[in-house]
Image (cartoon, grey):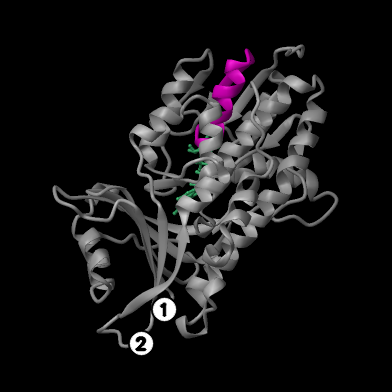
Amino acid sequence: MNMTAKKRIAIIGAGVAGMAFAILAARQGHFVHVFERRPQTGSELGAGVTLWPNASFVLKQMGLLDEIAKVSGKPKSMVRYDQHSSDPLNQAFSEKSRLAIHDINRQAQNETYSILRRDLMAILFDALQKTQAHIHFSHPVQAEALAQLKTEYDLVIGADGRMNSAARQNITSALSAESSVDNEAVYQGFINVIGISQSPFTLVDKTVIQDYWGDGERFGIVPIDDQTCYWAAGWVSLPKRKSHPFFTQKDLMHRFQHWPKPVIDVLQHAQGASINTIYVHDVNPITSWHNDNVLLIGDAAHAALPTSGQGACQALEDAWTLAQLLPEHDDIDVVLQQFQAKRIDKTTAIQRTGRHIAQTIFHTKPSDRAVDGSISQTPSHAIANFWMSGLIPSNV
Ligand SMILES: Cc1cc2nc3c(=O)[nH]c(=O)nc-3n(C[C@H](O)[C@H](O)[C@H](O)COP(=O)(O)OP(=O)(O)OC[C@H]3O[C@@H](n4cnc5c(N)ncnc54)[C@H](O)[C@@H]3O)c2cc1C
């Protein structure tokens, strides 16, 4: 039985981590206020998200999986194609490896879903609105306001993402008194141009995630159904300059004109308004996510590159783990310490994997790539065990 006192909780950021934790904490009866700098929910990070079995586990525990399933795809395999011709006018690719998603699902006893980010955010927001939590849009929280929140609330959650997190700044400036800690997000030398495509006819095989690896370039296609998919083009790009270019459908059609037909088809059906250019950053792992009553979760704590495929999944795991700890301990210090102890090894490993895969795709010649540059060569039970580690059903 939950005997702990109800707490006043401020959450900075209404992204995946902030909203998921707000829902769980409010349902436990805590007094929750969410502060979001944007005028509404949403995020620039990716047109869609693959919710691997660990994310499905959390969403099932939250009672949201049925709604997620209604609007999601159910990919059964992920096929990686590598370029094997250096002729720029004939970019021939062949299958290099195949990840049996259905097998991972079976081992993990949870499904994998592909969902448009706007649908995921809408489902989370709808669930949040059914609670007593208050959400304040157009309300950025910077250093001064954060100091104020620390005095007004029992717990302040920094879920303000990977770029310029005010909460991370607060933690790292406390840490840097002991050691040298860099707070800045780290540009990893490549960009992603992301988008959504839709056709009145069959556009993609709805069971297969297609992942094309070229020479310093990549194009990934994730189906939602056979007429709709989201995709990400990536390529090596110089360090971010003050004014950096954004890329259009026309630019992409030109860059990928000699790539395989599925890439061309998807680009031809791209929805212009969905296209966005992201200069891809992650953060260096840090040794502590908390100071006083402030705790980092999600990307603010451990942003991994999109090549890890796990950022949103880990954000959900954070929310779930923290919500499980809250009813167990009255002492916030204990909650924060235990949260970090439970989560930091897994998220640090995922950050490292993301960098390793990015290095293999963007900075290794196709001819020099080992097949294990992707996770496809890892046995499915090992992937399932790792992704499901630390997730135990509960009544929270
Ligand atoms: C190109 C790309 C593709 C990706 N694809 C995938 C994928 O397929 N699968 C996957 O699992 N992950 C993916 N990710 C990672 C995933 O998007 C993130 O890990 C996930 O969104 C993290 O959630 P979060 O809530 O921590 O941060 P976010 O979703 O970024 O949310 C942070 C929120 O905080 C708000 N905020 C920021 N600063 C302030 C402030 N000062 N005051 C108030 N509010 C503030 C922001 O507006 C935002 O709403 C991708 C990332 C990138 C870059």
Instruction: Give the farthest residue toward the right.
Output: 178
Image position, residue 110 (x, y; %): 52, 40
Residue highlighted by disc 1: 215
Callout 2 amino acid: Ser
Q: Quadrant of the C terminus?
A: top right
Q: Is residue 19 visible to the viewer in this orientation of the structure?
A: no
Image position, residue 192 (x, y; %): 41, 60
Q: For the point 61% across and 48% down, which residue is it?
A: 387
The residues colored magenta run 13-33
Where residue 215 sits, quadrant-wise, is: bottom left
Q: For the point 21% across and 55% down, which residue is it?
A: 203
Along the horizontal axis of the image, is 166 left or right of 248?
Answer: right
Tags 1 and 2 touching, CB below 8 Å: yes
Query: Does label 2 point to a residue whose CB lies under 8 Å from ligand 1?
Result: no
Q: Earlier in the sequence, mark 1 or mark 2?
A: 2
**Mark 2 neighbour density, 10 Å: few (under 14) some (14–19) many (20 or more):** few
Q: How many marks?
A: 2
Callout 1 amino acid: Asp
Q: Quadrant of the N terminus?
A: top right
**Mark 1 neighbour density, 10 Å: few (under 14) some (14–19) many (20 or more):** many
As helix, strand or loop, the secondary structure at mark 2 comes to: loop
Along the horizontal axis of the image, is 241 left or right of 251?
Answer: right
The numbered mark at residue 86 is 2
